[in-house]
Image (cartoon, rainbow, N blue to C red):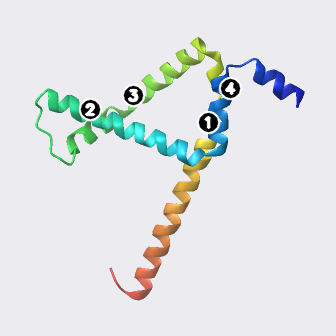
Amino acid sequence: SSSSSSSSSSRPRWVDVMNAGLDAAPGWTLFAFVLIDMGSALCLYALFAAAKVPVDADFALAYAVSKSIRAPRLALDAWVAKEMARAFPSLAEVRFGALVDAGSDAAAMVRDAVGKRWKRRRTTGTC
């Protein structure tokens, strides 16, 4: 326990707060990241609107654009992550594994729910 207290005292408080939040509520943290992602899509929509680019209300064009720039964005994300880890070494101490677990759990719940509904429809003959 002394090793954990010595390592936690060497890192900034926000790392411990972030890790505590990830440990306590990884699902809600993942949900927050999804909301942030949706917010960024709305910002993209606002840019299209400001530029007077005609976009359907269902946001199809913005979605298509976001998907088309995914590969370059992932490369940019990796580069930014590397630079942030270099500039802020404490970021490497934040345990994001709980987000992966929460995402896997949520995907399994959706898969199970959809699978049960699909099986029920197939056995009853309704579509």
Instruction: State the residue position of label 3.
Output: 73
Callout 2 crowding tier (Cα within 10 Å): few <14, some 14–19, many ≥20: some
The residue drawn where x is 21% and y is 40% is: 61
Left or right of residue 41: residue 26: right
Q: Amino acid at mark 3?
A: Arg
Instruction: State the residue position of label 4.
Output: 93
- State yes or no: discs 4 and 2 in contact (Cβ < 8 Å): no
Point out the tag, 4 or 2, that comes first from the N-terminus. Answer: 2
The residue drawn where x is 10% and y is 37% is: 54
Point out the tag, 4 or 3, that comes first from the N-terminus. Answer: 3
Q: CA distance from mark 2 to mark 3?
A: 14 Å
Q: CA distance from mark 1 to mark 3?
A: 20 Å
Which quadrant holds the N terminus? top right
Q: CA distance from mark 4 to mark 3?
A: 24 Å
- State yes or no: discs 1 and 4 in contact (Cβ < 8 Å): no
Callout 1 crowding tier (Cα within 10 Å): few <14, some 14–19, many ≥20: some
Instruction: State the residue position of label 2.
Output: 44
